C-alpha cells in the first residue's frame, strides 16, 4: 500500500523513503487521503471488514538540514528521538474516514502541534546546521488479511512534517 499526498517532497530516513509536507506553526491543516487498489480504482475500506485508521506522532531532534537542487528532496542529518515527547493530550492529531466505501480519509493536524512546549517543532532553512525538531506522523491502517480472515494486516505509513515559523 502506498500513500501519496499532494504537494509533498520526499524524505529519506534510515533508508525509508517517506513524504514530507511543510506546515506553519499556529495553523491547522486537514489533509485528504485516498486509498486505491493496484489498478488505481478507489479502495472500499468497508470490505471485507471495516479497515481501521489511526495516527500517532514522534518528535525528533535534527542536527542539519539540506535540500537537493530542485527542492524536491529533504536530507536530514543526525536524527535522535527527542527526550521529552509531548503528551498526546497536548496536541490534536486525528485520522479518520470521510467516505470509507470509496477509500477516502483525512488527517487533521491541529494548530497546537508544539505539544507541551518542550519541543517546538521547527526545521531551519536549507543548508543550516542549527538544531531543529521534526514532527513525524505515522498512519496505521489495519484491514482483514486476504489469506486468513481471522488475522489483521497492519500497514504503517510514515509522514514527515517540516514545521516553519510564520
Image: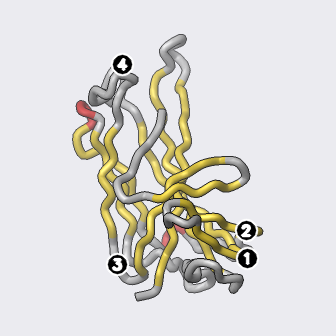
Of labels 1 and 4, the one closer to you: 1
Q: Is residue 21 above or below residue 25?
A: above
Quarter where residue 37 is shown: top left
How packed is label 4: few (under 14 Cα within 10 Å), some, or many (20 or more)?
few
**Residue 112: x and y, percent?**
43, 78
| Residue where numbered disc 3 is placed | 27
Q: Is residue 60 above or below residue 114?
A: above
Q: CA distance from mark 3 to mark 2?
A: 27 Å
Left or right of 136 in this view: 104? left
Q: In terms of secondary structure, where does tag 4 sit?
A: loop
Q: In terms of secondary structure, where does tag 3 sit?
A: loop
How packed is label 1: few (under 14 Cα within 10 Å), some, or many (20 or more)?
some
| Residue where numbered disc 2 is placed | 77
- Considering only order in the chain, which callout, 3 or 1, is on the residue closer to the N terminus? 3
- For residue 156, which numbered disc appears in the image? none
| Residue where numbered disc 4 is placed | 48
Task: Find out whether the residues at labels 1 and 4 contact each other: C-beta distance under 8 Å.
Answer: no
- Considering only order in the chain, which callout, 4 or 2, is on the residue closer to the N terminus? 4
Q: CA distance from mark 1 to mark 4?
A: 45 Å
| Residue where numbered disc 1 is placed | 63
Residue nearer the viewer, 159 or 152: 159
Q: Is residue 121 above or below residue 140?
A: below
- Considering only order in the chain, which callout, 2 or 3, is on the residue closer to the N terminus? 3
Q: CA distance from mark 2 to mark 4?
A: 42 Å
* Residue at (22, 40) in percent of width and height: 99
* Residue at (47, 74) in percent of width and height: 113
Of labels 3 and 2, the one closer to you: 2
Q: Is residue 123 above or below residue 159?
A: below
* Residue at (69, 73) in percent of width and height: 62
Of labels 3 and 4, the one closer to you: 3
Q: CA distance from mark 2 to mark 1?
A: 6 Å
Quarter where residue 81 is shown: bottom right
Amino acid at each position: 500500500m502506498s500513500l501519496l499526498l499532494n504537494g509533498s517532497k520526499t524524505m529519506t530516513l534510515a533508508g525509508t523513503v517517506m513524504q514530507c509536507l511543510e506546515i506553519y506553526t499556529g495553523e491547522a491543516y486537514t489533509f485528504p487521503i485516498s486509498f486505491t487498489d493496484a489498478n488505481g480504482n478507489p479502495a472500499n475500506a468497508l470490505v471485507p471488514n471495516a479497515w481501521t485508521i489511526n495516527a500517532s506522532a514522534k518528535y525528533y531532534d535534527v542536527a542539519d538540514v539540506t535540500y537537493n537542487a530542485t527542492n524536491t528532496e529533504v536530507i536530514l542529518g543526525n536524527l535522535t528521538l527527542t527526550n521529552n515527547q509531548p503528551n498526546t493530550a497536548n496536541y490534536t492529531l486525528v485520522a479518520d474516514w470521510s467516505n470509507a466505501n470509496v477509500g477516502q480519509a483525512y488527517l487533521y493536524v491541529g494548530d497546537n502541534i508544539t505539544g507541551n512546549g518542550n519541543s517546538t517543532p521547527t526545521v531551519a532553512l536549507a543548508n543550516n546546521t542549527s538544531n531543529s525538531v521534526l514532527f513525524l506522523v505515522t498512519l496505521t491502517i489495519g484491514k482483514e488479511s486476504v489469506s486468513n480472515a481471522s488475522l489483521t494486516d497492519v500497514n504503517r505509513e510514515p509522514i514527515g512534517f517540516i514545521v516553519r515559523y510564520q
